[in-house]
Image (cartoon, grey):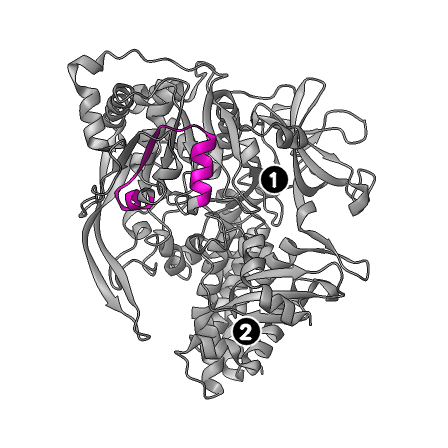
Amino acid sequence: MGEPIWILGIVAFLKGLARLYDLIIYIPWMVIDNPRWKRKQSAKIKARPVSEQPNAPYRTVDCFHELTVSMYHECVTLDDLFIRAVRLFGPLDCLGTREFLAEEDEKQSNGKVFKKLILGEYHWETFDEVSHRISNLGSGLRALGQKPRSNICIFADTRAEWMITAQACFRYNFTLVTLYATLGEDAVVHGINEADVTHIVTTGDLLPKFKNILNRMPQVTHLVYMEEQGKLAQLDGFPSNITVHSMKQVEDIGSRPEHIGTAVSKPTREDLAVIMYTSGSTGLPKGVMISHGNLMAGMSGQVERVVELSPSDTYIGYLPLAHVLELSAEIGSISSGVKIGYSSPNTLADTSSKIKKGTPGDATVLKPTLIAAVPIIMDRLYKGVWEKVNGGGPLVRALFKFFYDYKLRKINRGYDCPFLNRSIFAATSKLLGGRVRMMLSGGAPLSSDTQKFMNICFCCPIGQGYGLTETCGAATVQHVWDLSTGRVGAPLQCNEIMLRDWVEGGYTSKDTPNPRGEVLIGGGNVTMGYYKNPEKTKEDFITINGQRWFCSGDIGQFEPDGCLKIIDRKKDLVKLQGGEYVSLSKVETVLNLCPMIDNVCVYADPMKMFTIGLVVPNQKAVGIFAKSLGLDTEDLDAICKNEAVEKEVLKSLSEFAKKGKLERFEVPAKITLVTDIWSPDTGLVTDAFKLKRRNIEKQYQDDITRMYA
């Protein structure tokens, strides 16, 4: 059904007004915005092959003849980088933590009780103060028996003390073993035992988790916990052979006269800085060995793509620091004097799950200028805003769509819209504090629709990047002036990229119009391999002409301007019985934009002719439809089992699949609605919200069998 005639009349009037506005400000716009320069920059060649040979590696044209290995020539290790920052920015704010005021129980309509937080302002520590704590902590750990070049584990959520611990390890040459705080007991035991860890740094609220598993980790002797605001740690019940200290106690030990002079075993570029255990999306986590030199090289490329970093910037840290994307982003920020305010996915925005209604979320208080995000978080913002717009009535919907489309046209031509930024889109941009000047997206493919939406509604460019733990995070990042979407940008100045033919999948360097193949990344940011796993290291890492390369398993294509586009993944590619190949992650990226759902896992049996889907519905969206059927909107289980609701969700998914230009055989022919929340705590997704397919398939095996029956 179309909009009422009177609304169409208003829109027509606005179109005429917009044309007049464009005419009046045309000359000032051309001078101030300089759209021709932006279009020229966006269209220019950004990378090119190093030779005329087939499958030749591509390098960025900005640093074509030599790959970079450090942000600053005088800095060789991560500690050098921090010491330089302290020298330049000593008295300035460095790390900030929000004050805890109170915790309240909030009863839900379904009888459940949620804990809600009331938080105050951010309290800051300067670069000088942080450096002092780093020295004391490192000295204290040495006094407790931690040895240089020996492994020490950190098992904690993202917070200032996490970064302080990491920097202490870098300064004293302890190898930092990172484990996601949401890993299950078996994965934690596996990582700590494999790495021969004796000292573990964790948080007060995670201490009880170790009571059940310490008997399976006989080499562990020390637990150090970060204190929780407003809470006392439970210190009883630990075996007599385990020494438990608070982080403050360890810093106090390190500050004693007899320990202050403890010799620092300064690391070298070749020393192992981090053993970063993956999230275990396909089984037990693997430990990726990352040297100081690897991270230094990786950041030299990543930071170059984030223009004009300075102490005037504020970065909000909320993604897991056990993920290389967040770790490298934070270290790179600190090296440029950027202050970091800490948050969490549960307290990030005013509407986040742990923020008491009516009190501000972390972004509102901090007002960051820089933020990193994974696509699923951006997809949720996308659906949340459109849900609110569509629920505002026909006039609100028509006006928002008009201004949205108007700004989209202008952005595509290189213009900005400051008037709309300060009026129409001020409310949406304030969801993240209202001052964000650049966002970085990584961890998974970001859809073009979501990238455009974030650019328009949050009034800043979205730089999509691509990389892996094995390449210290990003290997490509879009330039800030690149007007395109759906691509991951050109190779960074620290690495080169080539495409290896995958004939079985039908991807080769001879493909037209663009060469395609498996993405191989080479350079100083390519890590040392997998800890105590030489077979897997040999499988995924190769050496060509003295250059170390990582074989990603992702399928990419190089576009005419040298930018990379990720189009497939070998492990996600399933051949159906009819011979058609289905890229599961590609289909999920499209379907996840459907407002009727929160998440989807597409499953394909090679012995069948069609795909199926396991779907987490959006409770509000399906509740509205359920109400029209006369169902109890509070009973999500009954709603999900209702055949009419299931058919409506499948219909909506099919419509989005058509908009996303998916082939008929790619679209799930059957779906099952599930009531479980797919969060890292459930073990069904990683901390970066990637699907753990094996876990999902195992949990919903009965549903899969039924759909294929």
Q: Which mark is residue 63?
A: none
Q: Is residue 72 visible?
A: yes
Q: Is residue 560 visible?
A: no
Residue at the spot 36% in from the left edge and 47% down from the top edge: 435
At label 1, which amino acid type do we have?
Gly
Q: Is residue 499 left or right of residue 625?
A: right
Q: Position of residue 174 (x, y in %)?
A: 38, 22
Q: Quadrant of the N terminus?
A: bottom right
Q: Does dot 2 land on a helix, a strand or a loop?
A: helix
Q: Which mark is residue 489?
A: 1
Q: Position of residue 133 (x, y in %)?
A: 24, 26
Q: Is residue 643 above or below residue 112?
A: below
The residue singled out by tag 2 in the image is: 12
Residue 174 included in the magenta stretch of the image = no
Image quarter for residue 256?
Answer: top left
- Residue extent of the magenta highlight: 186-209
At label 2, which amino acid type do we have?
Ala
Q: Is residue 586 above or below residue 487?
A: below
